[in-house]
Amino acid sequence: MARPRVLLELGGDEALTRDLAAGGTFAVGCTLALGEECELVVGELVLTARVVFVDDRGAGLELVGGALAPAAIELDDIDEPANRAPTLHERLRGLTLVQQVKRAQKAEVSERILLERIYGKTVWEALLRNPRLTGPEVARIARMGALPRPMIELIVGNGGWLQIPEVRRALLANPRLGTDQILRVLRLLPRHELKIAASTTGYPRPVRDAAKRLVRELG
């Protein structure tokens, strides 16, 4: 089976270059599981990497085989013509708030990842209103503990997203999920998942307690 691919745009980012030179990097928006291997695409390089940690923002990747020489990584700075076209990262930096929102609402996946990397929570709502947003992207935003309640309601109110198990699990793990929202999500779970939710310590206590009550009601 082919390994999944993770695209990393340096865009002149010195911190990313230093991380790769040290043997790893952080991929914003990456939803791979801990220990999973992938192909990390950096410019023309295709590297083998392994997920060594995950959090709400993405995944930390370790290069299999060790670090790279900085000269091999800094692709944007080698033999560049003075009139080279700006990279996507460079084009997205310095956008006004209105421009950020407009781009996020229509952006394709590589641009969405960069927009969130640069602007963070400022573009969450606009991303959630992007019809191209994928299930894993919705789930990643849904896990954010700082996600405002109106945005949680935006996700909970989308029936299509609630049909995605990854999105439901992400919502249930969010401590800001309200009582009525907890019940709306739990009622969509199959019975066996409901039993799991009742004992999953990674879920907040209100979620576990509500799941236990529903299990009892179902007999």
Image (cartoon, grey):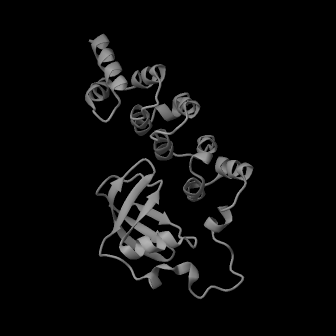
**Residue 88 lies in what quarter of the image?**
bottom right
In this rendering, the answer to whether 169 lies above or below 40 is: above
**With respect to residue 57, does 159 lie above or below?**
above
Give the x, y percent position of residue 179: 45, 20
Q: Can you tell which quarter of the image residue 87 is in?
A: bottom right
Asked if residue 3 shows in the view, the reply is no
Q: What residue is rendered at 30% in x and 23% in y? A: 191
Residue in view at x 38 percent, y 59 percent: 60
Instruction: Say whether residue 147 is left or right of residue 48.
Output: right
On the rendered image, what quadrant is the N terminus found in?
Answer: bottom left
Q: Position of residue 6 (x, y in %)?
A: 45, 62
Can you say whether 213 is above or below 15 in the image? above
Q: Position of residue 86 (x, y in %)?
A: 67, 73
In the image, 81 versus 132, the foreground residue is: 81
Q: Is residue 120 visible?
A: yes
The image shows residue 213 at horizontal and vertical percentages of: 31, 15
In the picture, measured across the screen, residue 175 lies left or right of residue 51, that is: right
Q: Residue at x 62, y 85 (%)?
A: 80
Q: Quadrant of residue 34?
A: bottom left
- Residue displayed at 59% across by 41% down: 128
Taking the image as shown, residue 197 lies to the left or right of residue 163, namely left
Task: Report the quarter where the C terminus lies.
Answer: top left
Question: In this rendering, is residue 30 above or below 169?
Answer: below
- The image shows a total of numbered marks equal to 0
